[in-house]
Every structure is written in structure tokens, then in C-alpha cells.
Amino acid sequence: MAVEPVVYGASERPPRGDYARAGADYTCPQDYSRYTEADHDTYRRLYERQVALLPGRACKEFIAGLPSLGPSHHIPRFEQVNEGLVKATGWEIVGVPGLIPEVPFFTLLANRKFPVTDWIRTPEEFDYIVEPDIFHDLFGHVPLLYDPVFADHMQEYGKGGLKAHRLGACELLSRLYWYTIEFGLIRQKDGLRAYGAGILSSPGELQHAVESSEPQRLPLDVERVMRTRYKIDSYQQTYFVIDSFQELFDKTAPDFTPIYERVKGLPEIAAGDAG
Ligand code: PHE
Ligand code: FE
């Protein structure tokens, strides 16, 4: 094996990606010939179910970026996506066998390369999958990389991740990723909308996050986010809301070094705790 596989949280199952295919930077070429007709069909069905849910729930920048992934009837070729993406914002997608460790992940983002898992879930996992697959990574994350402000923010996040790693603060920074890039909400002219990839690639959570009266929705506050634990196996009980991607960029621009120090001295907040 070229590199070690990576497991997220307390999973019983070993990660299914074949890490022997990955190079030292954890990337691997997309093995397009390996996809079966059933794989393409899974992609098409996931895409069609999700796209129908987007109006009134997904932010306008996501809806604008989505067609750039190409037609929904087969799994996109990464090279083809990159033709447009590189021109739009200088970002590029690269294949990975699955989750990758912090430092290679942050390094890719800092270089405007977004890692996309190249395999797709089985039909049994149509509604729920524990690990990110190509549908989550591509459909959920890539459309917003066409937005210039969000694209710049992702790169800053990568640079900030390398710094957090040096400072022993990756866990605090990963909460920010979770509550923004994965599960963030944005208030737009027409109402509350989702921009987080974990929401946008999930049929159930998209409705829960935007429409349910159950979860609490708080304005984005970096320190509050860093103190808040998260659950990876249920809908979120707390969402953080921004008014624009510029707000996300600006609120995460300050040097986090003193913020990490302060937050390390404060108690954690449970995922569903009020205030
Ligand atoms: N400003 C952060 C720091 O100094 C880096 C960062 C930028 C983190 C954007 C997340 C998002 O560490
Ligand atoms: Fe993700």
C-alpha cells in the first residue's frame, strides 16, 4: 500500500477506497473504465432526486454552478469538469481513493485543488452513506468552486488548516469546516438557503435544514462554532447562518492563533445546546 487509509470517527467498517492507487499526495487518477452501468445509473438517480429539491432550498450560486458538472446521465469525467473550472476560478478537482489525512487535504486546498473521491456508493446506500463518495464530493462541493469569493475562501481554509496543524488546533478548525462548508446556511433575498455540501447532497437534510422548525439557526460566530461539537450520524441540531460569502470570508480572515488559545480554555458546547 502506497499510503495509509483514513477512517473518520468511530466507524466499524474499514474505508473501502483502494489506497494502493494513491500517490504520495494521496491523489489518484479517476479510473473511469471501472464504472459500471449500474454506477452511472446510481449517479443519475442521485442527481435527479437531488436537483428536484434545490429550488427554494439551495443558494443561487450553487444552482448557477451545478450545470458546469455536465449532464446527469453519467458520472462526469474529472478532466472535462476541469476544463471549465480552471477557467472560471483557477480551481481543479483531483481524484482521491477516499478520506485523506489532514496535511495532504489542507495542502491540496491551499493549492486550489479539491479532492474528489472517485468511487460511487452501492444501490443499498442510495439514501445514506457514512463515507463521502463521488456524489457527495462532486455534486455537494464543486458547484460553489465556480463562485469567486467562495473559491478564495476554500483556499484560505486550506492555508489555515496547515497553520492549525502546526498549532495543534485541527479539531477546532474542523468544526468550522463542518458548520460552514458542510452544513452552512445563507440568508438570501428570497429567504434561507443551503450552501453546505453535506446538506446539498442529502435529500432529507436539505428539507430539515431549510424548512424544519426543529433545529436552531444562529448567526455565524467563529468562536461559538469552534466550541460546538458535531454529530456525523444524524441531522444537525444547530446550523450557522451567513448573509453572504463575503461575510464568511471576512469572519474567517483574522489570525486564528489567539482565538484557538481562547477557545481551548472554554467549555465545549453540545451539538444541540441553545445559545
Ligand atoms: N484566518 C485563519 C487563521 O489565521 C485561516 C482561515 C481562513 C481558516 C479561512 C478558515 C477559513 O488561521
Ligand atoms: Fe464534504
Image (cartoon, helix red, strand yellow):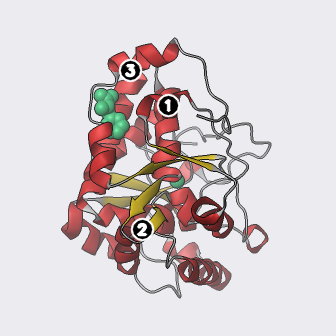
Q: Is mark 2 on a helix, strand or loop?
A: loop
Badge 1 amino acid: Arg
Residue to which mark 3 is pinned: 259
| Point 39% across, 58% down: residue | 94
Residue to which mark 2 is pinned: 59
Residue 39 in the image: x percent, y percent? Answer: 63, 78
Residue 105 in the image: x percent, y percent? Answer: 43, 42
Q: Label 1 to label 2, Cα distance in Å?
A: 24 Å
Q: Is residue 81 left or right of residue 209?
A: left
Q: Can residue 66 be seen in this view?
A: yes
Q: Can residue 158 be seen in this view?
A: no
* Dots 3, 2 in contact, CB < 8 A: no
Q: Is mark 3 on a helix, strand or loop?
A: helix
Residue to which mark 1 is pinned: 224
Q: In this view, does 208 lie above or below 39?
A: above
Q: Is mark 3 within 8 Å of ligand 1?
A: yes
Residue 104 in the image: x percent, y percent? Answer: 42, 39
Between label 3 and label 1, give the one nearer the viewer. Answer: 1
| Point 30% across, 47% down: residue | 247
Quarter of the image containing the N terminus? top right
Badge 3 amino acid: Ile
Badge 2 amino acid: Cys
Q: In this view, does 46 lie to the left or right of 189?
A: right
In which quadrant of the rendered view does residue 115 lie?
Answer: bottom left
Q: Nearer the viewer, residue 88 or 96?
A: 88
Q: Say which label, 1 or 2, has the lower sequence index.
A: 2
Residue 268 in the image: x percent, y percent? Answer: 61, 23
Q: Say which label, 3 or 2, has the lower sequence index.
A: 2
> Callout 2 environment at 10 Å: few (<14), some (14 to 19), or many (20+)?
many
| Point 34% across, 76% down: residue | 64
State the residue lying farthest toward the top: 265
